[in-house]
Image (cartoon, rainbow, N blue to C red):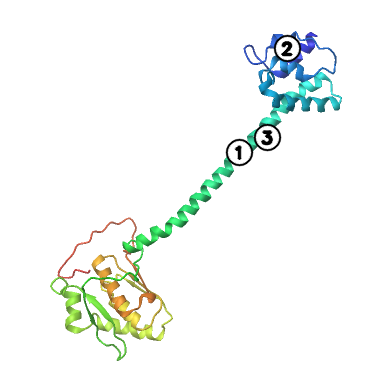
Amino acid sequence: MNVINEEIHHTLGVTEGEIFIVERIVNHRFRNDQSSLLDLLRQHVVIFSGNENENAQQWFYNIDLKFCELKLSFHDRLELIPYLFLQMLQLFCLIICVLLISVYVFKNSFLFSFINSYSSKIFISWKTSFNDHVDLNILTSESFKCVKRKLLLDKYRTTVCIHEIQKDRDVSGHLVSHGIWEEHLVTHFIRILSTYKQYSFIDIGANLGIYTMYATSLGCSNIISIECFRPNIERIHRSIQLENVQKQVELIPRVLYNKSDVYLSLRANIKNNIGS
């Protein structure tokens, strides 16, 4: 009997003051080798005692009945109990992990859907505020001075909106007095694009969009105009609408530089050249 009591104490791994009352287990009288484990646990384990725990009792009764069908001795059944509960604990942990992963996936998929649906609204607001690219379909109501420019190569002419001459004598003033700005370069560029209209054209630092607008007159369908100064952007926007070439141009309100992390300040009306 002492050997059996020691085995029980070792198998259950209990200590004084815990749920299992070691003294009562040690002094328990085993009637025979087919004694029910449920009888033992009902006396010494709280969870298996009382009517409110009928489900736990029924579950353990079925387990114990299966042990009896396998003709396991009481000692063998007792030794299997810790492993049985360990497997149940592992299963419980697995279920919890699956639930947590499911919740995580659901939350992230919901978050992704939310961001995906909300990003279009953000994108629209960016376009409206000139932070990403300008929505050229939004009608402008500014009263800029916009005039037809000089006919080049006897074929190509476009509209350009300008600044007040008093504030922008170099570019706007030259456009008014001569009808063109950098005529030699613009003509050379027109010759190239008129031959290769399938080429894309990128106008970096577009200013008033002179090159951009002449490219539209050539029928180029993929024009990217990059300009950071808002008054210039607004005038390019208006010129594009007057010529009805919104589908040909992407107007990007950005600055391009050959170095990163460089901060530059914008100042208006530098030497009578407000747009540069």
Residue type beneath disc 1: Cys
User: Gap between marks 2 and 3, in whole Å?
Assistant: 29 Å
Mark 2 / mark 1, whichever is N-terminal: 2
> Residue 57 lies in what quarter of the image?
top right
Q: Nearer the viewer, residue 15 or 49?
A: 49
Q: Residue at x 74, y 26 (%)?
A: 58
Residue annotated with mark 2: 25
Q: Nearer the viewer, residue 204 or 164?
A: 164
Q: Position of residue 161 (x, y in %)?
A: 24, 76
The residue most toward the bottom is: 154
Can you say which quadrant of the picture contains the N terminus? Answer: top right
Q: Residue at x 52, y 48 (%)?
A: 108
Residue 97 numbered tag: 1
In the image, residue 265 sits, relative to residue 67, either above or below, namely: below
Mark 3 / mark 1, whichever is N-terminal: 3
Residue type beneath disc 2: Ile
How would you rate the neighbour count of disc 3 (Cα within 10 Å): few for under 14, some for 14-19, many for 20 or more? few
Q: Secondary structure at mark 2?
A: helix
Can residue 97 be seen in the rendering of this structure? yes
Q: Residue at x 66, y 18 (%)?
A: 46
Q: Position of residue 237 (x, y in %)?
A: 29, 72
Q: Position of residue 111 (x, y in %)?
A: 48, 50
Q: Residue at x 35, y 68 (%)?
A: 135
The residue most toward the left is: 166
Q: Position of residue 63 (x, y in %)?
A: 77, 27
Residue 91 numbered tag: 3
Mark 2 / mark 3, whichever is N-terminal: 2
How would you rate the neighbour count of disc 2 (Cα within 10 Å): few for under 14, some for 14-19, many for 20 or more? some
Left or right? Give the position of 170 relative to 75: left
Can you say which quadrant of the picture contains the C terminus? Answer: bottom left
